[in-house]
Amino acid sequence: MRKLLPFLLLSLILVSEISCTKSDPQFVAPPEKPAIVKEAGELLFKVIPLSATEVKLLFQYPPGRNLLKLLLKKDTATVGAYNVIKNTVNTSANNYYAVTIQYNFDSTVQYDFKVQTNRLKDTIYQYTISKYTHSFKDAYTYRKVLPTRQNISFDITPSRNFMFIVDDSANTLLTKRLSLKNYAVDTINTQPGSLHIRAVSDSSFLVQPLNFDNRFLSGDSAALQEYNFVSAKTIFLDWVSDGYGRISRVIDNHIFVTNPIFTNGNTSLINLADKSKKVYGPSLVNFQIIRENNYDNIYTGNLIVNTQTGVLTAPVPSGASETVEYIDNTIQLAIAAGYTQYLNGTTPGYFSHLSVYRNQNKIYGGTELADRGFRFPAIQLIKNNTILFYQYYGYGTTFNVDGYYTLDLNTGKVTLIQSDDASPFGDFQLDEKRMISIRNDGIYELIKK
């Protein structure tokens, strides 16, 4: 009996422990309450159609919460859910978000976007963007004809046969000549001071070296010279301002340049054929408003310089508030854009409008819109009273598409013909079918379909 007692006691202990273990309730966390989805008002956005079945949305959203998800709605049905990605490239712009939607859109249907934040306690904030109709316009076929790392400067030759490009490749400046006939590329031995390139001919351009006649130039002086890379010869043209001046493009074999500011502050119109020049004092020409990126005329502010007589004339009335962007000298048509600044609280913005003048008479006045900008081809062909231009928008609460538009002066109708958010540096419409476009990553040929 005594021998059985320890065994019985041990059995009782084990049974007691098992019994206690079975009877102890396990801890179960209470289920999380479903989040409340709360409409939060307006959200600033940009819309970028990428193809017939793809659209990209960009959002500007203040810090505090994160945008996480977008629901694509067709009527009341959710037809797609997409992750919203926070900006990770530029940390100074960390309140910007993006999402790309791939969906077989019906161009006759209006869709809604429901953009949702992360959960904050028991609330998800939702922004509704309503009545989106997907329409991708593609009037052009794109082809990159010259990749570049960083377009420092570019110019087209007067013959329109070549383009010069100064490219920064691995911290080395290279000057290249691109044939606009077959897109062959020549690399040219870059001369000192050829950073802001100006094409004189197919084989020569202007340079501004700081070393001249075996001495280093001091102060504000640089020697403007014409450099022929075939013969490797230079021709001195004039003394120009190195740090403050402006230099126009070559128009009708003439160039408008700022002479050294602290010497006399003059501006010279130089005839590149015979090297003669006409000098303007600072009271007549303000060097700060000499235009450097116009190929149709030489401009100082809104005045154009007659290269034959040197006379300054106004293509638009003196009271016009717009800036002249392009003049078709054949039909005396002046395209102008007007910008007016405003403050939305403490945030600056601008209103813009497009105007067209013929012989100083306004024949078209466009609607004022907020935060819209224009870019006009530096060379363009105006056919059948139709003007081509690039139009781009800031972040807003309405659907606006960046891209190429046409203005029909016969009807006053503005039409999107090409969705494009690349913001070209410069466009050159060489003929009715072909346009050369300077982009951040290279030179493109756009062929009209």
Image (spheres, rainbow, N blue to C red):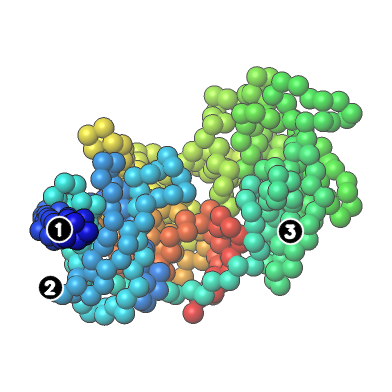
- Residue 329 image label: none
In percent of width and height, residue 143 lies at 58, 71
Q: Nearer the viewer, residue 402 or 266?
A: 402
In contact (CB < 8 Å): disc 1 and disc 2: no
Mark sitting earlier along the chain (1/3): 1
Mark sitting earlier along the chain (1/2): 1
The amino acid type, in three-letter code, at marker 1 is: Leu
Residue highlighted by disc 2: 76
Crowding near the residue tagged with mark 2, few <14, some 14–19, many ≥20 C-alpha atoms within 10 Å: few
- Residue 177 image label: 3
Residue 137 in sight from this viewpoint? no
Q: Nearer the viewer, residue 306 or 254?
A: 254
Q: Is residue 225 above or below residue 222?
A: below
CA gap between label 1 and label 3 equals 98 Å
Q: Secondary structure at mark 2?
A: loop
Residue highlighted by disc 1: 12
